[in-house]
Image (cartoon, rainbow, N blue to C red):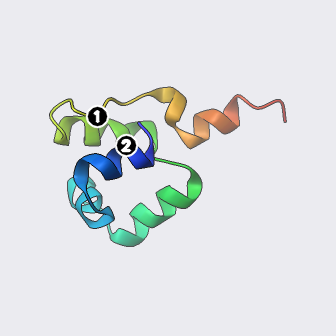
Amino acid sequence: MTYDEALKHFGTGRAIGDALRVTGSRVSQCRTAGGFSYPMQCVLEKESRGALVARRDDDPAQVLGNSAA
């Protein structure tokens, strides 16, 4: 899932943080990094009762790992 998908579902960054049990600062860091790690996405999927779906392709580290660099 993308940051925007999570934001649309939860409504605010603070609500995302509450679901993940992290600070708003950490949520902001995830946004800056390009999204949530796959494990964080899995937590959000569970907390959203399946409305959001975790995708490895949306993990910013996965995207960097697939680059030619």
Q: Position of residue 34 (x, y in %)?
A: 56, 50
Relative placement, left or right, of 27 versus 62 is left
Q: Residue at x 36, y 31 (%)?
A: 54
Specify the label residue 66 is tagged with: none
Quarter occupied by the C terminus: top right
Local crowd at mark 2 within 10 Å, few (<14), some, or many (≥20)? few
Local crowd at mark 1 within 10 Å, few (<14), some, or many (≥20)? some
Q: Position of residue 42 (x, y in %)?
A: 31, 35
Q: What amino acid is at disc 2?
A: Glu
Relative placement, left or right, of 67 versus 48 is right
State the residue lying farthest toward the right: 69
Quarter occupied by the N terminus: top left
Q: Residue at x 28, y 34 (%)?
A: 52
- Label 2, label 1: how far apart the Cα atoms are: 7 Å
Q: Residue at x 25, y 57 (%)?
A: 11
Q: Are circles 2 and 1 on residues that touch, CB within 8 Å? A: yes
When the figure is inspected, residue 7 is found, relative to residue 14, above or below; the finding is above
Q: Position of residue 48 (x, y in %)?
A: 19, 40
Disc count in the image?
2
Q: Residue at x 28, y 61 (%)?
A: 17
Q: Position of residue 26 (x, y in %)?
A: 42, 65
When the figure is inspected, residue 67 is found, relative to residue 47, above or below; the finding is above
When the figure is inspected, residue 15 is found, relative to residue 47, above or below; the finding is below
Q: What amino acid is at disc 1?
A: Leu
Specify the label residue 5 is tagged with: 2
What residue does disc 1 label? 52
Q: Secondary structure at mark 2?
A: helix
Q: Secondary structure at mark 1?
A: loop
Lower sequence index among marks 2 and 1: 2
